[in-house]
Structure formats: C-alpha cells, structure tokens
Image: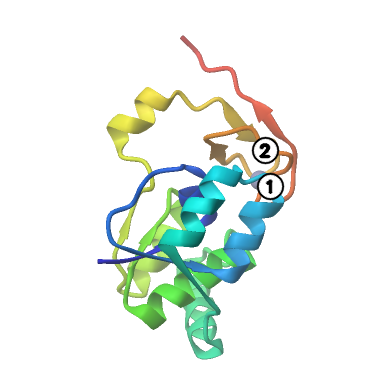
C-alpha cells in the first residue's frame, strides 16, 4: 500500500508498513522542527520524496474551500493531500482538517497513532498556537511555528 505521511506522522516515529512517500516540503518542515537524526536516517532509506503537481494542489485548494478547512490547512498540509491525489495513496495523519479534506477528495486516510497507542504514549507536548499535540519536544511547531510546551495531563 502507498502511504503519504504528514509531519505529525513522521514525528510519531512509527514504522509504517507499505511504500512510504513524503512531500519535500514536509521533510523540510520536520527537519526544521528538530527531527531526530535516527528517524531521518530511517526516512531517507525507506521513503521517497516527491514534489506535488500544481493541478493536484489546485484540486486540494478547491476541496478545502468546499469543506471550510482552507484556513486550517498549511502549505505542507496541502502538499500531503496533493501528493496522495497524484499517487492515489492513503494519507497518514492525525490532523482532522487533513482527514476531512482527504475524505472530500475520495482519498483514504489513517491515523499516525492507533487509538490504543495514543493512550499509552501519554502526549505531553502541545503547540501554544494551533493546539496540535506532538510526540516529542520540538523547538517550534512544524505547522504554525509557535512555541511547543510540555502539556500537563489531568490524572
Ligand atoms: Zn502549532
């Protein structure tokens, strides 16, 4: 199965079974936010990096307007969806806006972390800007650039 990973999927460090594809913008974003070098080495050997096509980016932009998710999708989020359109692949993401637009485009999607795993991981890093959770400490949020803080969970 062909899988297109978004930044949260990359940073999850999960080992995905199947052919893994990454838009070039997502890889740059993950590097900027302090991608673990070991994880990057795995990515470089296991994944293929692609530039999405303009016509697919336009289709994604149109679909996000239709679902009302256009303000929630970053440039790299759109690249993830455009690449999935091109490859007719499933998107791996924990981002609801991406999942929503993927459904609109007729693309399959799957969460980066399975629900059972999500509970075990105990998320403790959260962006102060967009509110996304990240599985590791980061210098800045890969999506919005805001500060990522340790998040104290209620017991
Ligand atoms: Zn953010």
Q: CA distance from mark 2 to mark 1?
A: 6 Å
Q: Earlier along the polypeptide chain: callout 2 or callout 1?
A: 1
Q: Is residue 62 above or below residue 89?
A: below
From the viewer's perspective, tell me whether residue 72 is left or right of residue 80: right
Question: Mark 1: few, some, or many residues within 10 Å (few <14, many ≥20)?
Answer: some
Circle 1: element type: loop
Does any portion of residue 26 appear in the rendered image?
A: yes
Cβ(mark 1) to ligand 1 < 8 Å? no
Q: Secondary structure at mark 2?
A: loop
Q: Residue 93 versus residue 3: which sits nearer the camera?
A: 3
What x and y, as percent, mark residue 105? 36, 75
- In this view, which residue lies farthest toward the bottom? 55
Q: Quadrant of residue 101?
A: bottom left
* Residue 71 in view here: no
Q: Left or right of 83: which side holds 70?
A: right
Residue 90 horizontal/vertical position (percent): 32, 66
Residue 48 is situated, as x and y percent measured from the top left of the image, at 46, 70
Q: Are marks 2 and 1 in contact (CB under 8 Å)?
A: yes
Q: Which residue is mark 2?
A: 138
Quadrant hosting ligand 1: top right
Q: Which mark is residue 51?
A: none
Q: Residue furthest left?
A: 1
Identity of the residue drawn at 40% across and 82% down: 86
Q: Residue at x 57, y 67 (%)?
A: 70
Residue located beneath label 1 in the image: 33
């Amino acid at each position: 199965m062909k899988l297109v990973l978004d930044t949260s999927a990359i940073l999850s460090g999960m080992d995905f079974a199947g052919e893994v594809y990454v838009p070039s913008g997502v890889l740059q974003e993950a590097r900027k936010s302090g991608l673990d070098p070991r994880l990057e080495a795995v990515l470089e050997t296991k994944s293929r990096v692609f530039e999405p096509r303009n016509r697919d980016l336009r289709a994604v932009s149109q679909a996000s307007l239709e679902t009302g998710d256009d303000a929630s999708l970053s440039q790299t989020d759109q690249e993830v969806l455009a690449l999935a359109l091109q490859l007719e692949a499933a998107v791996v993401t924990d981002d609801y806006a991406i999942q929503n637009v993927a459904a609109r485009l007729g693309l399959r999607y799957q969460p980066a972390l399975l629900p059972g795993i999500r509970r075990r991981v105990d998320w403790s890093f959260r962006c102060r800007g967009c509110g996304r959770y990240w599985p590791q400490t980061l210098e800045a949020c890969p999506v919005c650039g805001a500060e990522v803080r340790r998040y104290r969970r209620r017991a």
